[in-house]
Image (tube, rainbow, N blue to C red):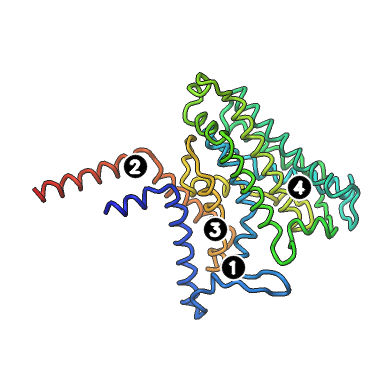
Amino acid sequence: MSKIKKITGMRLFLPIFCMILVMAVNILYDVASGNFALNFFTISVRNGVLYGRLIDILNRGSEIAILAIGMTLVVSASAGTDISVGSVMSLAASFCCMLLAGYGVSSTNDLAVPLLVGVLGGVLLACVCGAFNGFLVAYLNVQPMVATLILYSAARAIGLLLCNNLIVYVREDSFKMIGGYLGFIPTPIVIAAVCILIVAVILKKTALGLYIQSVGINKKASRIAGLNSSRIIFLCYVVCGLVAGIAGIVASSRISSADSNNIGLNYELDAILSVALGGNSLGGGKFNLAGSIIGAYTIQAITTTLYALGVSSDVAPVYKAIIVIIIVTIQAPPFKAYMKKRSAKKALAKGGAAA
């Protein structure tokens, strides 16, 4: 019994359990359909590239995994969520494609500026958006959801204005490679891995992770201890904007265009759910980046599984909402207190019976 408590008490238990549960559903579905039981784990090479359901989940879930990095830091430091990341993705993609195609051009096979200029332009604009959110939250003490609601509403519209209300197509091969393949490996997987690795190394090799958690646990106490709480929160929002910009460039490269209305649509919900599913408290404080990343790919696995089961894209958010309700309930302090109280009563009853 003590071993079970130890396992269930691990911070990564919830995301790993959910991932295993999704895998089990896929195995049962394959068996019921008369397919190979381990079809979900099968990876092959077709037309010179990796192919398989796992590869598809890692590939399609890359944008959510990248967003989860910034969302984890924001939630930990400010005890709030950035609901603008999906719209900032769209804005970064629109600005990037507008630069690459040239202002007023709706479709091009040649780049108006070097690829690096377009990509950096989109990412820098996303950082500016993150800085705007961070300034409102860190220095003006605006509630995170209220502060980020501004760009949630405006960023996508600004992207449409930049593109003259058009879908700007960039069909140049070097741009398409960002969301395509690097050799036989999907490029988004590589980009997500690099982003995760860089942030993980920074958090491990520096005291930044500890500072973020300290500010999230108690902002005033951290300030008294000598930490610049406002600057740390501001930095987290800038990082969140940065990763949103990167995810936006990847998303636009997948479709070789800037579709302002659809790029990043509802991605903020998946990013928040990834953090919650990763075992992180949405009330701020301690965080586990690995849990958020596992949560991000679990979300994509759930989405892929729902589609495989014949659930339409319009109904899929309902199931995600149910998952959110369950996770939030499990993490709620009253529920935890109730479970502890119940466990203590059982232990007391067993002790009395043994006596």
Asked if the residues shown at circle 3 and circle 4 are in contact, with their CB atoms under 8 angstroms apart, the answer is no
Picture coordinates of residue 172, whole percent (x, y): 85, 58
Q: Residue furthest top?
A: 224
Say whether disc 3 or disc 1 marks the residue closer to the N-terminus: 1
Label 1 residue SS: helix
Residue that badge 1 annotates: 53
> Closer to the observer: label 3 or label 2?
2
Where does the N terminus fall, quadrant-wise?
bottom left
Picture coordinates of residue 195, whole percent (x, y): 65, 48
Residue that badge 3 annotates: 316
Q: Residue furthest front?
A: 205
**Which one is nearer the viewer's eye here, 153 or 61?**
61
Kind of residue indicated by mark 3? Ala
Residue that badge 4 annotates: 93
Residue that badge 2 annotates: 336
Label 3 residue SS: helix
Q: Residue furthest bottom?
A: 34
Q: Residues within 10 Å of mark 2 (few under 14, many from 20)?
A: few
Kind of residue indicated by mark 4? Ala
| Distance in Å between CA atoms under marks 4 and 1 | 27 Å
| Distance in Å between CA atoms under marks 2 and 1 | 36 Å
Kind of residue indicated by mark 2? Lys
Above/below status of 213 relative to 225 = below
State the image quarter where residue 151 is shown. top right
Q: Residue at x 75, y 42 (%)?
A: 123
